[in-house]
Amino acid sequence: MKRECAICGRPRIEEAHVKGKKTFPKNGNKPVGDRNNNIIPLCRNHHDDFDNSHIGIIPDKSGFIIEEGDDCIAIKSRIDLSYLKDEYIRDKNLESSHMVRFRLGIISGNEHGKMW
């Protein structure tokens, strides 16, 4: 795995789980998960935003939708995300913020308007 943030390219990264560790079965106290298809390298700032549902993954794995203030921006990934499992991306995006889900096309404009 490339050792830079997939969003901004910073060299100091953390391993962000697309599918939460809590959702995998456990072997003792340790989750038994799919590390090969579930980890994205992110800097601390983007990892926090990702974990707090302010970043979604574009389903074609080309990049990210990032909530910034009252809007969202699309960012092309700096690394190849083709290794990620589609079901993990779908589940993560469903947990994303309302605005991110709207920008990803998960919810319609009518539903988006009802929430505000």
Image: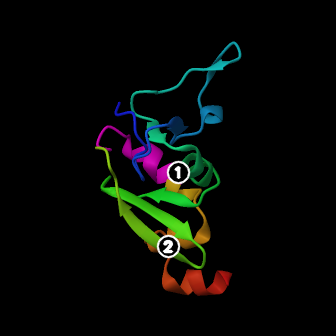
Determine which quarter of the picture holds residue 41.
top left
Residue at 44 percent across and 49 percent down: it is 89
Q: Residue at x 65, y 18 (%)?
A: 30
Residue 25, percent from left and from top? 61, 24
Numbered disc total: 2
Q: Residue at x 48, y 58 (%)?
A: 56
Q: Does 88 lie within the magenta span? A: yes
Q: Which residues are magenta?
A: 81-92
Quadrant containing the C terminus is bottom right
Q: Where on the picture, by quarter, is residue 59?
A: bottom left
Question: Crowding at label 1, few (<14), some or many (≥20) Cα neighbours within 10 Å?
Answer: many
Q: Name the residue that disc number 1 marks.
A: 92
Q: Up-down: is 88 above or below 35?
A: below
Tell me the kind of residue under disc 1.
Answer: Lys
Residue extending farthest front: 11
Secondary element at image label 2: strand
39 relative to 2 in the view: left or right: right
- The residue that disc 2 covers is 72
**Horizontal arrangement in the rendering, residue 64 relative to residue 26 (left or right):** left
